[in-house]
Structures are given as C-alpha cells and as structure tokens.
Amino acid sequence: MEISKLHVHNVDLHYHAGQERHHETTLEDYVEHARLSGRRVLGLTDHLGRYLGGNASAGRNDLHYPASLAGLEEYRRDVDRMQPLYPELLLLFAPEVPPATALSEVPDTVTALADFFIIEAAFPSPSSPEQNTEALVARLRETREFTDRTGRPAFIAHPMRAAVNLRLIKHQVQPWVTEMPPRPGGEFTPGELKEFFLLDFERIGRAAAELGVPLELNGNTQYRVRSSNLPAPLQMLWSALGVLNSLGCELLPGSDQHGFRAGVGRIGMYVAADCFHALGITIRDMPFLEDLLEGTSAEDSVSTQAGARSRKGGP
C-alpha cells in the first residue's frame, strides 16, 4: 500500500469492532462499513478491560467474544480472517489500554497479538492543569518505555476527551463557556487553552516531540464538541491541536467509532480530516503511519504482511 496514494480520511487508527460492536452486527459488517466510508488503513480495537481483569462484561449475555484472553485471541483471529476478503484494506489489530492499567502490566500474550497499541492517559483533576499535565507527560514517558521494550508502536488516545466531557457533555455547560465569542482565526492564548482544557499544551507538545510518542486527533472528541452547538470550543480545540503540531508533536487520525446504526440509518464517527487540513497536516507528516505501511505495496499481500508483523514481534 503506497502512502502517497492515501488521504487523511482513508486512515482510521481507532475503530472499535469487537466486543463493543452492536450485538446484531458482525465484524464483516464493520469492515464493510469502513470500506464504504473510504477507510483503507484500519486499526481495529476494543478496550482491553472488556477482556482482561474487569467487570465491564459481567452479567452480559450479548458478548461477541469471551471476556478473557481467549476472547481477545479469537477477535484477532477474526481480523486475520477478514483480511483476505478485503485485499484493498490494511487491517491492523490495536488493543486500547485503559488509564488505570500500567503498561508494565500488559501481558506478553497480549503484546504478541497486537500490531500497535492505543494508550489512554489519566485525567486526575477537574480543576488542576498541573496535575493533569503531569499525568499525561508521565504516560508519554511510560509509553516510550513500553514501545522500546516490546517493539510495538503506540500512541496516546483522545487527550482532550476528559476536558470536553467536563465542559460540554457530562455536566451543565457553564455560562462563561456559552458566552465565549467565536474566534474563527483561533486567536486563543496559552492561558485560555489551559483554563478550558485543564492541560498545558506547550509542555505536553514538547514532551511528545522529545519522546517521539504521537497523540491522537480524535474524531469522536470533535463530534462531541460540534454537538455543543458552540463555535468557540471547536475553534479552541483546533487551536490547542495547532500548538501541539507547532511544537513537533505528531498527530494521528482516529475516529473512535463504536457503531454505525441509528434511527436515521447508518451513522458513525468520522476521521476529522477537516481539522488536519486546517492545520496543514498530511499523511506525509505521520512517521508512525509510514512505519506501519513500510514494506507494503499494491502488489504485496497485505494479509501476509500484517500477520508477519504480529508473529515477528514488531512492525
């Protein structure tokens, strides 16, 4: 698969399609939806807690896979079985590690299944940018150590999600947020960004660039902000991502899609290509993706190479 032939919307590195898919759908339904919606590189994922050490699946009778390592292995086998059916796609397997799980505790058996990992960071405080920034920087360091030790690439998922939930989704929107005037040019100060997102983006951007750990530009987070009907928070989100980008932090596309069925038909999350375009970021600015695609070509068997990456222990 040639990277020069891909656009940003063709790449979705965060696509839930296993335990978390709708109970009346199959993995093939999800991959087919991905194909029809223009995705060509697909990171198939699920939260690791759905399989290991958690109670998220307790008492449910609609599970697609056992809530165990055996279930995760079965999901991986299903992904491998899908690949020959979709030779025009590159299907990759990428477990999502929750913030409470230390990466040193991820079993080697799980690492052996993965092409790459999606890592969540903690957001410990509803009021302290310092605590949240320190937690994210610590997770960046931990991720760098994990990738060096295991040979598995990894990135940090939806770094602004917790703040968006706090400001717009899970609590009453505060008047000061509602009253923010639009700023189409994104003219927000570092202090304003820190106040809204409770994160120091300059420190985070420098740390991510120094450590070589990418952050995700998450479509689901963008969708949540757009759903608020307030222009300023979306402009602020793009401004914060622009700060990260300007400091050399690599940003990666992921929709964080969990489903595509709704009362109006087929609807799901999107890869926020519009934001990438506004920031001037192209596929060529993503070394992480280039590494994933290294060695593939239009003539090669994507299935064989994806499986080989898994068996050899690295990309």
Image (cartoon, rainbow, N blue to C red):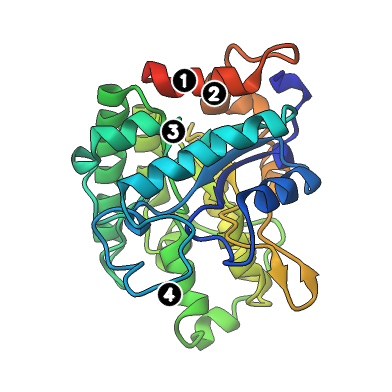
Mark 4 residue crowding within 10 angstroms, few (<14) / some (14–19) / many (20+): some
Q: CA distance from mark 1 to mark 3?
A: 10 Å
Q: Foreground mark, 4 or 1?
A: 1
Say if 283 sits above or below 62 in the image.
above
* Residue in the foreground of this view, choosing between 174 and 25: 25
Question: Quadrant location of the N terminus?
Answer: top right
Instruction: Check residue 154 in the rendering and tell me which mark sits there, or answer none.
Output: none
| Residue denoted by label 2 | 306
Horizontal placement of 121 versus 262: left or right?
left
Of the numbered discs 4 and 3, the one sitting upstream in the chain is 3
Local secondary structure at mark 4:
helix
Proximity of marks 1 and 2: CB atoms separated by less than 8 Å: yes
Local secondary structure at mark 3:
loop
Check disc 2 and give the amino acid type: Ala
Q: Foreground mark, 1 or 3?
A: 1
Mark 2 residue crowding within 10 angstroms, few (<14) / some (14–19) / many (20+): many
Proximity of marks 2 and 4: CB atoms separated by less than 8 Å: no
* Residue in the foreground of this view, choosing between 184 and 301: 301
Horizontal placement of 174 versus 57: left or right?
right
Can you give x and y, in whole percent of width and height, for residue 193 in the image? 47, 60
